[in-house]
Amino acid sequence: MPIALIDCNSFYASCERIFRPDLKGRPIVVLSNNDGCIVAMSSEAKGLNIPRGTPLFQLQNLFRANNVEVFSSNYTLYGDISKRVMNIIMEATDSVEVYSIDEAFADWEFHDPIDQAYRLRKRILNWVGMPVSIGIAETKTLAKIANHIGKKNSSGLFEITEEIRERVLKETPIEDVWGIGRQTTLFLRSRKVYTAYDFIKMEDWWVKKNLTIVALRTKWELEGRKAIDMEEEVKENRAIISSKSFGSPIEDLKNLIEGTKSYVHDAFHKMVRQKLKAKSITLYLTTNNFRVNDKQYKNAITMDFPDYTDYLPDFVKAADKGIRQIYREGFKYKKTSVMLINLRLDREITPDLFTLKDPRKKQIQQSINSINSRYGKGTIGCGIKKKTTAKWHMKQEFLSPRYTTAWDEIPLVK
Amino acid sequence: MIPLFINPVQAGFPSPATDYIESELDFNSYLINNKPATFAVRAQGDSMINIGIFPGDILITDRSITPRSNDIIIASLNKEFTVKRLIKKSSGIFLYPENKDYPILEINKESDFQIWGVVTYTIHSFLKG
């Protein structure tokens, strides 16, 4: 049963374009609100070859010179557009797995798979204004490669059939294979494995001995044998919980939030240690059931992120918001709990034997996370000093309207 | 949502209609035929006033409807959104206003023009003034 990977082209930038006919053809750059990094670029902006990690204030002139439009991430908008795209895909076929905010795998059992893909692509473009690429193959890993090729096609589609599979693998560099991380790539190249084809030519026992089970599953997938679904399903059912009673009951909202934040940190670190990302966080608070003379109150709330994330400030912000929403004055709270759910193993960062050997990298990330959460988000970010120029300090300046979710912000037409 | 019936048993007498309660009026399903493809935009200006589109009205727009001549459409023209009546003639494509103070626009190959969606309903409020 073939699988299709449908993925949106330059998703954030494309979302911004739907309601801005004046942006057609113009380079678009989308910033992360929190630390001022570039998180997305339209194809025209990619063509400007902006060196990675360039501080944003240095890019102002480049942007002006190239008529680049800059946006802050508008997750409300992106989430809504994503929902529409996914709904259209779900109407077209059974068994859709929404993999991220802009990607979905779907069963693609049709007698004319390319024609069906063409129709779906056209439909999503017409109905939502979102361009997508579709790759079709026997396994998810191959569908990812097919999608990559399709993206460069004029049709936006590509199918890897058994007949052409080996030829395609010969032309696929090993680092482009989903599930093969940087360190694994370095190791394989040192053993003269340069392409996906070279990789599948190695023996299973050799891969198992020198790499990980994840790499072996990847090999099977490249050979046309489905091996990933089993793993993904098991991981999805887990939850990571951090929950403790307070030494003495807390009544004050501020203290309650502070206490909860440390549980968020705990849960977050447990999650990240397992190379997982989460899509939702549940906050729970309660008074002490045993103190029968006290007024009792308990409540919980689940906050969803638009996409799977392992960025600490996302969780801290959500916890703050969530606790504020369920907090009621006049109660003595005994305990709060934090639960991270809808977890997924990030196949982009496979549990590499090799990356684990560099503890300094992990230490740095942990330090950054702690400093940022203590002194404010963006204290240490991707190469930008927070108080550089007033203009770049206020990220909200670049936020587009919530065109599809707020009545005051819907598009205007003359 | 507005319930169509209040159960008449509460008034103290039985009724043959008791078991037959209509479903509530669902405005969403009435106004929205194809949810993923439906958007709301807001009219500015008075170019379409003769068919009852007033400034501030909300236009429910469906991007999945194939536009036909005579449909009210949202289009991007010269990098801006506009609402007009689409007219297809043998001589070409035109955008008609509904207000004699506005010009009829002709669309040709050089025009920076793309249809964005078809207007299905408008929502006009009589209370805001």
Image: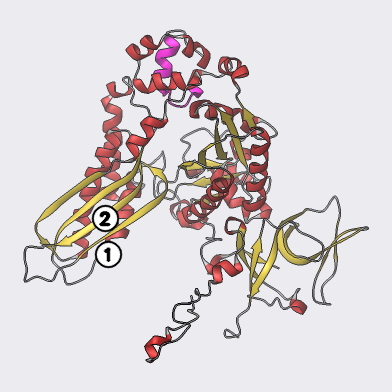
Q: Tell me the chain of label 1.
A: A
Q: Is residue A177 magenta?
A: yes
Compared across the picture, whether A397 is left or right of A351 comes to right
Compared across the picture, whether A231 is left or right of B80 comes to left
Location of residue A16 in the rendering, given as x and y in whole percent from the top left corner: 58, 52
Which disc number belongs to residue A283?
A: 2
Quadrant placement of the C terminus of chain A: bottom right
State yes or no: discs 2 and 1 in contact (Cβ < 8 Å).
Answer: yes
Name which residue lies at 23% across and 57% down: A284
Location of residue A20 in the rendering, given as x and y in whole percent from the top left corner: 64, 55
Compared across the picture, whether A282 is left or right of B94 comes to left
Query: How many marks do you count on the picture?
Result: 2
- Which residues make up the magenta segment? A175-190
Q: Residue A151 or A372: which is nearer the viewer?
A: A151
The main secondary structure of the magenta stretch is helix
Name the element at disc 2: strand
Q: Residue B43 or A254: which is nearer the viewer?
A: B43
N-term-proximal mark, 2 vs 1: 2
Please determine if labels 2 and 1 lie on a single subunit: yes
Name the element at disc 1: helix
